[in-house]
Amino acid sequence: MEGLGCLGALVVAFVVLGLIVHGNTKNEEARRKRIADAKAAYEEGLEKLRRDPSSAQLRGTVLDLGRQYSNLSRDQKGRTLFDEVALMNDINAATPGVVTAGSVAATPVSSIEERLARLERLKAQSLVTDDEYTAQRKRILDDA
């Protein structure tokens, strides 16, 4: 009888553990979906901005979408300077030659060398991590 009690407790423990793992899996799936949806909305916004680069309102909307996406992809830990620079680089790339009063950079970066040099300065000031540096450097080189 005593063996059945231990076996029963073990079965209950496995069932509870299974429910916990299943719940965590569902949460992770929902989190991934939110990130994917935010990324898709941001990319769609960038595409609209490419078609209408002079729209200051659309530029602001795309910036907000990018901030939402980057915040979700960082587990909602807030904005970083790296995120803001990356978002403005994306927006400036979508609107070449368009300068707005609200843009972080008053003039678009004209060369890959300048963008890489700016990224180097951010890294030297410890404003970006090694992983962020590597990812952004790849993005700059891929955009070339």
Image (cartoon, helix red, strand yellow):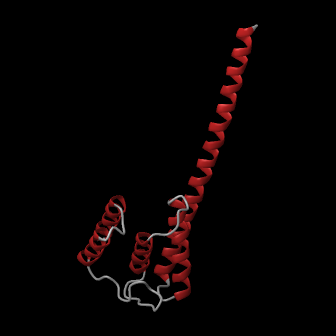
Q: Position of residue 99 (x, y in %)?
A: 41, 90
Residue 106 sits in which quadrant? Answer: bottom left
Q: Position of residue 91 (x, y in %)?
A: 44, 78
Write the residue at 37% across / 88% down: 97
Q: Position of residue 130 (x, y in %)?
A: 32, 60
Residue extending furthest right?
1
Q: Nearer the viewer, residue 143 or 102?
A: 102
The quarter of the picture where the C terminus appears is: bottom left
Residue extending furthest left?
113
Total numbered labels:
0
Write the residue at 58% across / 61% down: 37
Query: As displayed, is residue 142 above or below residue 112?
Result: above
Query: As displayed, is residue 16 above or below residue 108?
Result: above
Q: Nearer the viewer, residue 84 or 90?
A: 84
Residue 36 sits in which quadrant? Answer: bottom right
Left or right position of 141 against 46: left
Left or right position of 49 against 115: right
Query: As displayed, is residue 31 above or below residue 91?
Result: above
